[in-house]
Amino acid sequence: MHILTFDIEEWFHILDHTDTKSEAEWKKFPSRIHANCDRILDLLDRKQVKATFFCLGWVAEKYPEVIKKINAAGYEIGTHSHLHQLAYEQDKKGFTADLSRSIQTLESVIGKKVCSYRAPGFSLMQSNKWVFEALVEHGIEVDCSVFPAKRAHGGFEDFPTAQPTWVDLGGARLKEFPINLASVFGKSMVFSGGGYFRLLPMPVLKHFWSNSEYVMTYFHPRDFDAEQPMVPGLSKVRQFKSYYGLNSALGKLEAIMDAFPMMDLSQAEKEVNWENAPVYHLNK
Ligand SMILES: [Zn+2]
């Protein structure tokens, strides 16, 4: 099962960086979201492949036509928060207000219920697992925010699996589709989106894809935009991570789509045998 998802945000929604941290900074940058989303929609239309779009409420508020277009083309819409803040930097009250604002904005734009969520930067961790409660309280049924290993920022090391899993909150339940990881020299690494996807050569990507029964992808409009300006103030390492391989990423994704059938989240939900899926008990 290979699941295709996109996080719909601007090219300057770079996390953990002072110059792009808040809405006040974002005003300084020109928008590139229309052309960048069209590039993705064109690819999906050409390949006749379905995908799920986790959209920022901020984008829906500012450019409702972008979200309407994705919805009108028949793709599933989830939320990626409103203001793209890391969940582990918020308290439950602030997180909940942002989540609810994003859901209300997206629902009013598309006229449908929003039932799926992905946290910015996979920032759902052991230490803020109350996020699951907030999600359930706001009608979210499917979450894609867990990175089930240690990582530089965040990571949910204690999450028991890297496959579709029930999260049991002691009564209510939520379906979790974590990021899948490949093991390289005993270390866990992600290959199905962002900088890693752009960095890894095609044969390595194909190798990982062939050897994974479950792949959860996470692409962004900026991953395929070779013309975007450089965000000011980034360290050399972050410049590399954020800008390497932008030229070839769309071709790589297209080749992966040709080699491995992809589906959206709602199709994946139907294909999982939930009766036998692992269960993570939140409060044990
Ligand atoms: Zn994001």
Image (spheres, grey):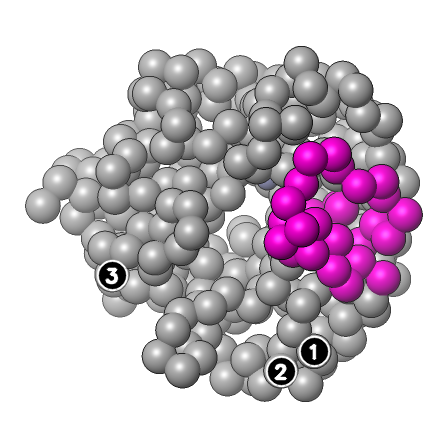
| Residue, disc 3 | 160
Image quadrant, ligand 1:
top right
Which span is picked out in magenta? 220-247
User: Residue drawn 81% across and 25% down?
Assistant: 29
Q: Amino acid at mark 1?
A: Pro
Q: Which residue is identified by label 2? A: 204
For marks 3 and 2, give the CA distance: 26 Å
Residue 59 picture location, percent across and down: 71, 26
Q: Quadrant of residue 209?
A: bottom right
Q: Is residue 81 magenta?
A: no
Q: Can residue 4 be seen here?
A: no
CA gap between label 1 and label 3 equals: 30 Å
Q: Residue at x 28, y 56 (%)?
A: 157
Q: Disc 1 designates what residue?
A: 201
**Three-letter amino acid code of the residue under disc 2:** Val
In the shown orientation, is residue 43 left or right of residue 75?
right
Element type at marker 2? helix
Say what secondary structure mark 1 lies in: loop
Between 258 and 245, which is closer to the camera in this rendering? 245
Q: Is residue 35 above or below residue 225?
A: above
